[in-house]
Amino acid sequence: MKTNDQQHDITQLEIEIEALAQEQAQCAAQVKELMIAEATHGENHAAEIHRLKQNKMMLGTQMQHLRAKIGAMKLGII
């Protein structure tokens, strides 16, 4: 029974990682759009680009943490 619960928890974490990855991809796409707008229209979006890049890094860290948690669960550490 415990392994079924553990597998369910791992599946939930994997779903969460996928959602974070999608959000990270959206941040990257927005950064690209803003950088193109800066280059072509002379607009200044530095603060927004910086915020999006920070958010993208934060999401990457969260995904890394969840992957480590999954690994620990598979090894029976948690």
Image: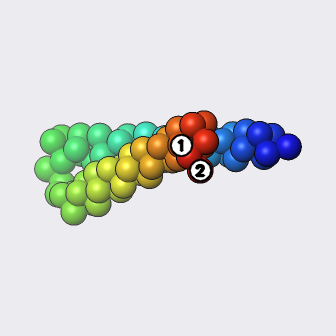
Q: Which residue lies furthest to the right in this view?
A: 1
Residue 56, percent from left and from top: 35, 49
Q: Nearer the viewer, residue 74 or 25?
A: 74
Could you tell me which quadrant the N terminus lies in?
Answer: top right
Q: Which residue is drawn at 56% across and 46% down?
A: 77
As displayed, is residue 16 above or below residue 75?
A: below
**Circle on res. 45:** none
Q: Which residue is drawn at 80% across and 40% down?
A: 4
Within 10 angstroms of label 2, few (less than 14), some, or many (20 or more) residues? few
Which kind of residue does numbered mark 2 sit on? Ile
Which kind of residue does numbered mark 1 sit on? Ala
Q: Can residue 63 be seen in this view?
A: no
Label pair 2/1, CB-CB below 8 angstroms:
yes
Q: Nearer the viewer, residue 2 or 55?
A: 2
Residue 48, percent from left and from top: 27, 60
Q: Can residue 36 be seen in this view?
A: yes
**Earlier residue among tags 2 and 1:** 1
Q: How far apart in space, not on screen, are marks 2 and 1 (Cα)?
A: 6 Å
Report the residue marked by disc 1. 72
Report the residue marked by disc 2. 78
Left or right: 68 as drawn, with respect to 48: right
Q: Which residue is drawn at 45% across and 49% down?
A: 65
The kind of secondary structure element at disc 2 is loop
| Residue 74, quarter of picture | top right
Left or right: 78 as drawn, with respect to 23: right
Left or right: 13 as drawn, with respect to 72: right
